[in-house]
Image: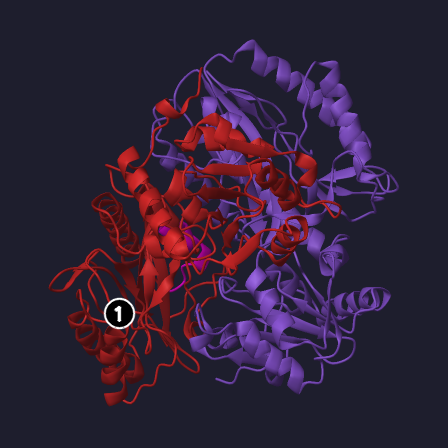
Chain colours: A purple, B red
Amino acid sequence: MVISPDTVELNFTREEYAARLFKTRKAMQQADLDSLLITDPANMAWLTGYDGWSFYVHQCVIVTLESEPIWFGRGIDANGAKRTTYLSHENIIEYPDHYVQSDDRHPMDFLCEILESKGLSSHSIGVEMDNYYFTAAAYASLVRNLPNANFKDCKNLVHWQRSVKSEQELSYMRKAGKIVEVMHQRIRETIHPGLRKHELVAEIYDAGLRGIPEYGGDYPAIVPLLPSGADASASHLTWNDKPMQSGEGTFFEIAGVYKRYHCPLSRTVFLGKPDQKFLDSEKAVLEGMEAGLEKAKAGNYCEDIAIAFFDVLEKHGIIKDSRTGYSIGLSYPPDWGEHTMSLRKGDKTVMKEGMTFHFMTGLWLDDWGLEITESLAIGANGPELLSSVPRELVVIS
Amino acid sequence: MVISPDTVELNFTREEYAARLFKTRKAMQQADLDSLLITDPANMAWLTGYDGWSFYVHQCVIVTLESEPIWFGRGIDANGAKRTTYLSHENIIEYPDHYVQSDDRHPMDFLCEILESKGLSSHSIGVEMDNYYFTAAAYASLVRNLPNANFKDCKNLVHWQRSVKSEQELSYMRKAGKIVEVMHQRIRETIHPGLRKHELVAEIYDAGLRGIPEYGGDYPAIVPLLPSGADASASHLTWNDKPMQSGEGTFFEIAGVYKRYHCPLSRTVFLGKPDQKFLDSEKAVLEGMEAGLEKAKAGNYCEDIAIAFFDVLEKHGIIKDSRTGYSIGLSYPPDWGEHTMSLRKGDKTVMKEGMTFHFMTGLWLDDWGLEITESLAIGANGPELLSSVPRELVVIS
């Protein structure tokens, strides 16, 4: 069986990939960059289609102003690049296995030889300085090996190109939205006091993976977070195998995922009769969300949503000092946020139609927590909610 | 409800945590380090008990030669540190939320102020240069803000302390081994031509999370990898929602996980009558594994296992140029390997009782692949297999 770029089944048209490359190059020129070394797996996928759990070893996509991008990675992953990208095979370059997790050599040393051989070694090269997959050692190797290159932090340049979603991307996110609906539905149907938490996690994964009859789910960039009682005062705890207790609230921060596109959505379930503080906070959050959603339209600033939400919370005597949302879309672990826009005071990015956000209105208090959130796309006149899950504190009595 | 370090339920005794700290400090002294900034989530957990999916923002544990370690992280994660570590609350230090994913300031800028105030700013400080969660930007912030500090790559110093497992750690890994047994059992029971792959993934997660009646499973540091047919020529593809086909082989690279301790184990399933090449390779791999396992005992080098395995493969005309295993244990995404020892030529680490490895004997050929692997603990006279799954190519006809 011959594998060739022509027979690869891509998630987007070749025209869409070409358009992405075009706007990336425009941004490169504005930033005075001759080339980019892209290490963020979501950016690699967005530019080339590459998809695989190989980001635990060093890899990148090299983008220049003219030629086809180059995938660079470990030898045993080159076939994965051949099977998931539109790149011609000559632009899939592999490094030998003895570079993997070695004390003596670094994969970026090998990359530098490639850059040298391609005449890119005295370029102005953009690197993703604060990306998980661009370690301090990776950067040190580049600087050591290419003394004539001018490395610059490209400041999430590709991330920013991803902020306005195409129609195809939006359709994937709506599918992810359908998936997160069945996940929350499953929680409502199965949760009860005495159910051991890992069993509930099994239900959540089952719903998220089975998806709906037409299409199945993908893995989320963050595993389900579902702390109960006082553990819900912490924002990022996962699970244990203990029974769910009556008299406790549990928030469920989960996402539906389709072809790596995410629709995160949180709800909180209280088993038994909720304390007044839950009911009061629910009221404040829901009212605040309405106020925030009214601001979620093209032309407003990101911070407008946050300010509207925080103002209502304050009226109810609640101070939230963490951001209340972020841009979402295509993601790989460890984060489903896009690391560009945040819904917080001071973020004066002007929202455009087709931008997508997780309106993350969670409250983490001294010894309890509440999350009721929405994911949305910015429209001309208001937001489109990406999924439809009853917006309420779920009480199972 | 008062949260205090005394009421936290830890996964290990306080004595075990103290012993870990003791040997880490000994290694620090040998490396001439006054303090360590530990960013690897598994190292943070191993040292302090900290557990949470918060590694997508900057955080670390500061270890000095004397005082209790310090957890440093985002404000909304501080409660998570209070609920999962033995640290006194004064040693849980949070940074404000406007440092999160900001273009204007970096969490490490804030950390530097803390280090300054604690008198550590002119220390010899070990950093994990090639860790995913220690980005080039994080390092640049440290160097910029603390001109009098002497930063050194600590070369996986804490990772190395983790290589010999305690009895409690081994017991967790054996539990993970029991979990991976039921996962493979489930695959055998449910796989058939026509089953859509995402539905099979749902079965795998269900088995891995439900675990066995006594204890439930945790999330794996790598999601299930299960490419079929020609996709199995690539080592790290995940899944889609298409039906399984007769006449194709699919490898399943999965892990059972208990309290973040992993037991990875791969098997390959062929639907229908396998080609001769599958049967020949199965024979070679199984024979090679026997040869490798014979070398898996205290006193031998890591490379001895690899050489014995590769020698048998070569006799069968198969050349494998990727490493054939690595140290395993406590892990967080994106990798369940420990980044210390590799089973490959040139790794002359002397194996000790209680070290644990994934003997990763996978073959990824031009247009197909085969994985039949084992996870094991090194014993005085030979290996202890951490799980018991029939070692064979599974044929479902």
Does B195 lie within the magenta span?
yes
**Rendered location of residue B143, percent (x, y):** 63, 54
Q: Quadrant of residue A268?
A: top right
**Rendered location of residue A359, percent (x, y):** 69, 36
The answer to whether residue B368 is above or below residue B176 is below
Q: Which of A134 and A75 is in front in this view?
A: A134
Does B286 lie within the magenta span?
no
Left or right side of A263 for A231: left
- Residue at x-position 57% and y-position 71%: A84
What number of labels is visible? 1
Residue type, label 1: Val
Q: Which residue lies furthest to the top in this view?
A: A276
- Residue at x-position 65% and y-position 87%: A117
Q: Quadrant of residue A128?
A: bottom right
Per the image, the residue denoted by label 1 is: B395
**Rendered location of residue A55, percent (x, y):** 52, 63
- Residue at x-position 50% and y-position 45%: A208
For label 1, the crowd category at 10 Å Cα-Cα, with few meaning under 14, some 14 to 19 and many 20 or more, is: some
**Rendered location of residue A364, percent (x, y):** 57, 26
The secondary element bearing badge 1 is classed as: strand
User: Which residues are drawn in magenta?
Assistant: B193-204
Q: Which residue lies furthest to the left in this view?
A: B381
The answer to whether residue B186 is above or below residue B324 is above
Q: Nearer the viewer, residue B18 or A230?
A: B18
Is most of the magenta stretch helix, strand or loop?
A: helix
Left or right side of B264 for B51: right
Q: Which chain carries label 1?
A: B
The answer to whether residue B83 is above or below residue A144 is above
